[in-house]
Image (cartoon, rainbow, N blue to C red):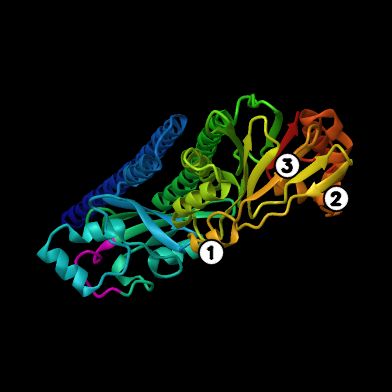
């Protein structure tokens, strides 16, 4: 009986001990689960805090004038810090070449590009050579790991890089045991590139929360890049506009400030650029005590290239005309100087004439330019001065010299000579009809009796009415010379 009681008590004690053990173990498990949950929660909060700090740093960088290279570095280093990664890289999309170009690659970034055995062996022989290759070697935007992310426009978590299906590299120490987060940088319909972070699986394994945080980081980074690009483009445009405005001011200064005081003649001229810079120019040249030169010129093309050639041509003519009273001789020297440096398809049409004080004789050369017109006071008729000539820059000299010749004619008191560029004759109205020579002759005849200034004003007013008040499509330059 006593034995039975003792056995029963022993079993009860054992059961109680087991119960206490089980209860204690369950309590410990619950505590461990709670601690694990707390640790995970703290990790998530810490990661989100790092993301917030990254976005704050990114925002500050956008508030100052940062270079793109600085922003690329900030994005990669921030992504590494937020995700606890060992390495990272940013590849920008070159749309023209359809390549992903490395813009920043950290020192410890694992290669997410295909590696040949030669590259791996070379890095073993020369440590650091692989990193140099990664920092300059662009990759096709539609192949490989990066191409998959870029074309698919979807972030990826690559558990182990070496086993990724889009990687054709043989097994190597640089890609084995490497985990990757990669995301497409895009803003609206515009594809900007790819951002990647890499880590060693022994040191870091990305969770689902890590992936979600990284995807958010990629979106914000793309937004920052798009804004920085737009800001830089705006800054560049403002700078270019300012430079063009300065160039335009300089170009206007190079035009004659006032008409020359040459006995027996009165001058009037106007230059109206179609853009900020003009490919047209006119100038007056004092050759000696009795002779005076006047030139009108039009460089084919528009904008800065035409304006640069126009300035060069003006300087060349000023130099060569001083020792040559023959207009053809002066333009021949200008042509031989400029032709070798003018690109194919460009040329300069010109009319250069030499006047003599108190003389009715005028000698001119027409180098591929619209024919000069002269209104005769005695008859009221407008004549066209025909003179053979080739545009400057078309030929290096021999053909130009054979074709281009001096032409001499006289002007009586009251006669008016008109020179103009094809921005006048080829101006179009809303129906596509051109202003052309007959209308120019009509405007000249209607105003010549009032003198050179009236001719310029009347012609430009008629032209403006013809094109309906719109801005001209080409530079407009006019010179009127009246014999007094």
Report whether residue 99 is seen.
Answer: yes
Q: Which mark is residue 438?
A: 2
**At 40% across and 33% down in the image, what residue appears?**
57
Residue bearing the label numbered 3: 410
Question: Mark 3 falls on what kind of element?
Answer: strand
Q: Nearer the viewer, residue 260 or 316?
A: 260
Q: Which of marks 1 and 3 is nearer the N terminus?
A: 1
- Determine whether label 1 and label 2 are within 8 Å by CB: no
Magenta includes 170? Answer: yes
Magenta includes 210? Answer: no
Residue bearing the label numbered 1: 399
Which of discs 1 and 2 lies nearer the camera? The answer is 1
Q: How far apart are marks 1 and 3 (CA)?
A: 28 Å
Q: What stretch is highlighted in magenta?
A: 169-178
- Determine whether label 1 and label 3 are within 8 Å by CB: no
Which of discs 1 and 3 lies nearer the camera? The answer is 3
The image position of residue 163, as x and y in percent, is 32, 71
Which of discs 3 and 2 lies nearer the camera? The answer is 3
Neighbour class for label 3 at 10 Å: few (<14), some, many (≥20)? few
Question: Mark 1 falls on what kind of element?
Answer: helix
Question: Mark 2 falls on what kind of element?
Answer: helix
The image position of residue 157, as x and y in percent, is 40, 60
The image position of residue 250, as x and y in percent, is 53, 30
Q: 222 above or below 163?
A: above
**At 76% across and 51% down in the image, what residue appears?**
426
Report whether residue 184 is seen.
Answer: no
Task: Indicate the quadrant containing the C terminus: top left, top right, bottom left or bottom right.
Answer: top right
Q: Earlier in the sequence, mark 3 or mark 2?
A: 3
């Amino acid at each position: 009986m006593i034995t039975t009681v003792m056995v029963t008590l022993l079993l009860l004690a054992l059961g109680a001990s087991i119960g206490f053990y089980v209860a204690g173990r369950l309590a410990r498990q619950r505590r461990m689960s709670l601690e694990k949950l707390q640790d995970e929660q703290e990790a998530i909060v810490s990661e989100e805090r790092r993301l917030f700090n990254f976005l704050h740093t990114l925002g500050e960088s956008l508030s100052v004038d940062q270079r793109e290279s600085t922003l690329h570095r900030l994005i990669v280093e921030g992504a590494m810090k937020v995700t606890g990664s060992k390495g990272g890289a940013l590849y920008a999309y070159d749309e023209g070449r359809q390549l992903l170009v490395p813009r920043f690659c950290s020192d410890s970034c694992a290669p997410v590009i295909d590696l040949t055995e030669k590259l791996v062996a070379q890095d073993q022989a020369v440590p650091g050579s692989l990193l140099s290759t990664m920092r300059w070697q662009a990759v096709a935007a539609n192949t490989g790991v990066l191409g998959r992310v870029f074309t698919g426009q979807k972030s990826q978590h690559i558990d182990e890089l070496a086993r990724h299906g889009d990687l054709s590299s043989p097994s190597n120490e640089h890609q084995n045991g490497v985990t990757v987060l990669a995301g497409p940088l895009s803003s609206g319909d515009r594809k900007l590139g790819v951002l990647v972070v890499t880590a060693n699986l022994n040191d870091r394994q990305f969770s689902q929360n890590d992936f979600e945080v990284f995807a958010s980081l990629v979106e914000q980074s793309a937004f920052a890049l798009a804004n920085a690009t737009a800001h830089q483009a705006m800054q560049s445009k403002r700078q270019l506009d300012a430079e063009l405005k300065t160039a335009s001011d300089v170009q206007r200064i190079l035009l004659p400030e006032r008409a020359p005081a040459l006995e027996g003649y009165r001058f009037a001229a106007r230059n109206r650029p179609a853009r900020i810079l003009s490919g047209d120019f006119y100038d007056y040249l004092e050759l000696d005590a009795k002779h005076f030169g006047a030139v009108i010129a039009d460089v084919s093309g528009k904008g800065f290239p035409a304006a640069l050639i126009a300035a060069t041509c003006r300087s060349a003519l000023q130099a060569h005309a001083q020792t040559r009273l023959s207009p053809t001789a002066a333009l021949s020297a200008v042509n031989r100087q400029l032709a070798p440096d003018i690109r194919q398809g460009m040329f300069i049409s010109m009319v250069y004439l030499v006047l003599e004080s108190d003389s009715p004789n005028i000698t001119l050369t027409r180098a591929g330019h619209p024919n000069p017109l002269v209104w005769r006071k005695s008859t009221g008729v407008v004549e066209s001065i025909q003179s053979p000539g080739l545009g400057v820059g078309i030929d290096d000299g021999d053909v130009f010299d054979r074709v281009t010749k001096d032409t001499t004619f006289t002007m009586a008191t009251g006669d008016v000579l008109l020179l103009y560029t094809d921005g006048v004759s080829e101006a179009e109205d809303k129906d596509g009809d051109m202003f052309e020579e007959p209308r120019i002759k009509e405007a000249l005849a209607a105003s010549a009796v009032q003198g050179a200034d009236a001719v310029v004003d009347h012609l430009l007013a008629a032209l403006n009415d013809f094109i309906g008040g719109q801005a001209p499509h080409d530079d407009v330059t006019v010179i009127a010379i009246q014999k007094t």
